[in-house]
Amino acid sequence: MRFLLCLIFALNAGGLSAGEQTPLRKLLTADEAKAWQGVGRINMRGAGFCTGAMIAPDLVLTAAHCMYNPQTGALLNPSDIEFLAGWRSGRAGAQRKARRFVVHKDYTPGRDVKVDRVSSDIAVIQLELPITGNFIKAFEYYASPRIGDDVKVVSYAQDRSEAPSIEEPCQVIDIDPRALILTCNVDYGASGSPIFIIDHGVPKIASVVSAKAIVDGQKVALGASLGAPLEELLSQLHANRGVFQSKKPGRLSIAEQLGNKGHTAKTLRP
């Protein structure tokens, strides 16, 4: 992770914070929000909300930790989950209840954030009824982002829960085999938000927001790598398998896991 640390110091030396480099912009008009209708707010009864994005007419990709009650740690009931596609100013392009959901088989719930946990922090919600129509489209995913790639994050979050916001551009500044590290400045409620790469003019999901971190004073976001983990998750869903628990997490700090033993790192769930 030496490259990551050098880049972080370079950004600090330039006098610009991640928030100044990557401003959030609310998508308030229909024209602005048109391309992002497949992103929506996930309401969890008694447990707040997250963000998710459609990857099929009846499937929504989000973060695994969103499927657990943040106060009790208990797994949510699918009947308590609702997806509001394109939610903006009190209206949704489509509104669906969850039929079921599956979290990655290697995900272990917990309040502390570990890199292994970030790598499996993905879940898929299957909706009771598919969302069809010309104006709400599911997104493809992008399995091979590279360091330096520009990305966009579309999210709902604390203090901006009534309309999606887009953050562009932020960048992939390092890639651990298990996770992406990005300059994106995310906040509470943004968990599960899709991280998009524009591939030949088409937005594709490269990751989902798992955690926000502060490394040597620099705000960054952590997201699960897709590719094989998402394929495994979809295989679980198609096999009609449920939620799995993995081995207990290790004792290494997030800094140690990222190869950053000599510097401070603090991670929080968005």
Image: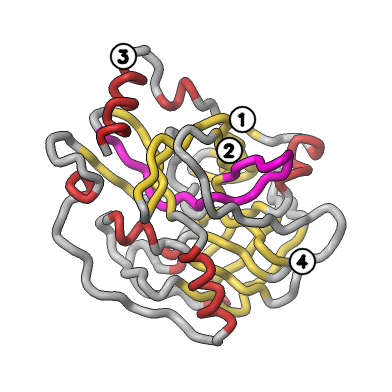
Q: Which residue matches tag 2?
A: 152
The N terminus, quarter of image: top left
Q: Determine the residue positioned at 28% across, 22% down.
A: 9
Q: Which residue matches tag 4?
A: 131
User: Which is more foreground, mark 2 or mark 1?
Assistant: 2
Residue 166, x across and y down, in percent: 61, 36
Taking 167 as reference, is 5 left or right?
left
The residues tagged by marks 4 and 2 sit, at their Cα atoms, a distance apart of 24 Å
Quarter residue 245 falls in: bottom left
User: Which is more foreground, mark 1 or mark 3?
Assistant: 3
Q: Residue furthest top?
A: 14
Residue 162, x across and y down, in percent: 63, 44
User: Which is more foreground, mark 4 or mark 3?
Assistant: 3
Given residues 56 and 78, the one toward you in this image is 56
Residue type at mark 3 is: Ala
Residue 164, x across and y down, in percent: 63, 42
Residue type at mark 2 is: Lys
Given residues 187 and 22, the one toward you in this image is 22
Q: Is residue 45 visible?
A: no
Q: Determine the residue positioned at 50% across, 58% down.
A: 226
The residues tagged by marks 1 and 4 sit, at their Cα atoms, a distance apart of 26 Å
Q: Residues within 10 Å of mark 2 (few under 14, many from 20)?
A: many
Residue 13, which numbered label? 3
The verdict on residue 6 being magenta is: no
Taking 173 as reference, is 192 left or right?
right
Residue type at mark 1 is: Arg
Is 102 located above or below residue 263 in the figure? below
What are the residue bounds of the magenta stretch? 196-215
